[in-house]
Image: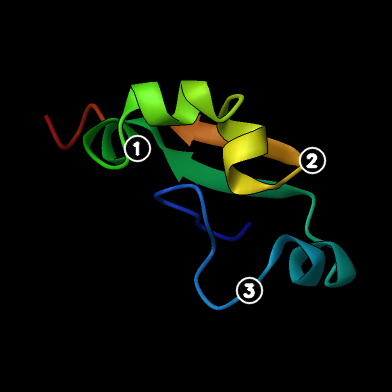
C-alpha cells in the first residue's frame, strides 16, 4: 500500500499506480488539513478528485501528530 501522505504518491502518477496494480493508497488527514487545507480539498471535489485517484483510500486521522 503506497503512502500518499498529502494526497499524492511521490514520483508516481495515478496511472502508474493503476498500472502497478495498486488498490489502496494511504493518506494522512492531519497533513492534508495543514497543507493544502480542508477547504482546498473540498473545493476540488474531495480527496479522490484532489488526488486524481479512483481506487480505495485509507486515511489516518493524524492523531499521533497532535
| Residue at the extreme front of the image, as rendered | 43
Percent position of residue 39, x then y: 37, 21
The residue drawn where x is 11% and y is 29% is: 66
In the rendered structure, which disc, 1 or 2, sits on the residue that comes first in sequence?
A: 1
Q: Residues within 10 Å of mark 2 (few under 14, many from 20)?
A: few
The residue drawn where x is 49% and y is 21% is: 42
Question: Of helix, strand and loop, which one carries label 3?
Answer: loop
Instruction: Report the side of 49 relative to 31 (left or right).
Output: right
Find the distance from the CA under tag 3 to the CA under tag 2: 15 Å
Tell me how many marks there are. Answer: 3
Percent position of residue 57, x then y: 64, 37
The residue drawn where x is 32% and y is 40% is: 36
Q: Which residue is mark 3?
A: 12
Find the distance from the CA under tag 3 to the CA under tag 1: 18 Å
Q: Which residue is mark 1?
A: 32
Q: Is residue 12 above or below residue 64?
A: below
Mark 1 and mark 2 in contact? Answer it, CB < 8 Å: no
The residue drawn where x is 83% and y is 72% is: 20
Identify the disc placed on residue 54.
2
Amino acid at each position: 500500500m503506497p503512502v500518499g501522505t498529502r494526497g499524492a504518491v511521490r514520483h508516481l502518477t495515478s496511472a502508474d499506480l493503476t498500472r502497478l496494480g495498486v488498490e489502496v493508497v494511504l493518506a494522512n488527514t492531519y497533513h492534508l488539513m495543514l497543507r493544502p487545507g480542508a477547504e482546498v480539498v473540498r473545493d476540488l471535489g474531495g480527496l479522490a478528485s484532489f488526488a486524481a485517484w479512483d481506487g480505495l483510500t485509507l486515511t489516518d486521522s493524524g492523531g499521533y501528530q497532535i
